[in-house]
Image: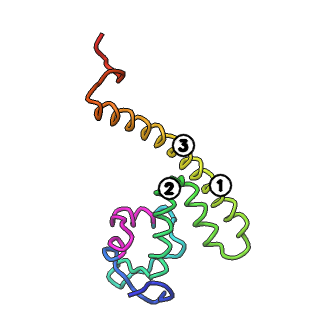
Amino acid sequence: MTTTGDATQSLGIGEVAERTGLSVHALRFYEREGLLVGPVRRTSGGRRRYTSFDVEWLLVCVKLRESGMPLADLKHFAELVRHGPGNEAERLRLLDAHRQRVDAQIEALEECRSVIAWKVGVYAEHLARGEAGGLWDPRP
């Protein structure tokens, strides 16, 4: 079943947790912190009911958090979206600033990977020759 365009679909908290990878506890936290863009409907028994739009939004939130977006920025982004049209430039600034931080992290990780790959090559070369000379030895 596709979630795109079916805003009337009604999902329980367990189904949403499974689809988003968030725990039930995290979903309640997101709601409490105002990270959702719409109110979560409730059944007459008080059980939360989510729409496919909620799931799509949460999937974006998950990627923003996994990529290191601060909770305060995510909360601000959700507030902007909740306010509707007219603040798209501010949303863009917020997302672009985050993209720049992610780009910097990727660059730093690529530098780390380069050093690690070099060191793996050094060890592989020494082991292929059957010698450990020239490798770090903590013994005096």
- From the image, tell me which residue sits under label 3: 108
Q: Amino acid at mark 2?
A: Ser
Density class for disc 2 (Cα within 10 Å; few <14, some 14-19, many ≥20) is some
* Helix, strand or loop for disc 3: helix
In this figure, which residue is indicated by the disc labeled 2?
Answer: 67
Foreground of the two, 41 or 17: 17
The mark lying in front, picked from 3 and 1, is: 3
Q: Amino acid at mark 1?
A: Ala
Q: Earlier in the sequence, mark 1 or mark 2?
A: 2
Most frequent secondary structure within the magenta stretch:
helix
Q: Residue at x 39, y 66 (%)?
A: 28
Q: Amino acid at mark 3?
A: Ala
**Which of the pair 101/75 is nearer the observer?**
101
Q: In the image, residue 100 lies at what x, y percent? A: 63, 53
Q: Quadrant of the N terminus?
A: bottom left
Q: In the image, which residues are magenta?
A: 16-30
The image shows residue 114 at horizontal and vertical percentages of 48, 41
* The C terminus: image quadrant: top left
Q: CA distance from mark 3 to mark 1?
A: 17 Å
Q: Mark 1 sits on what residue?
A: 97
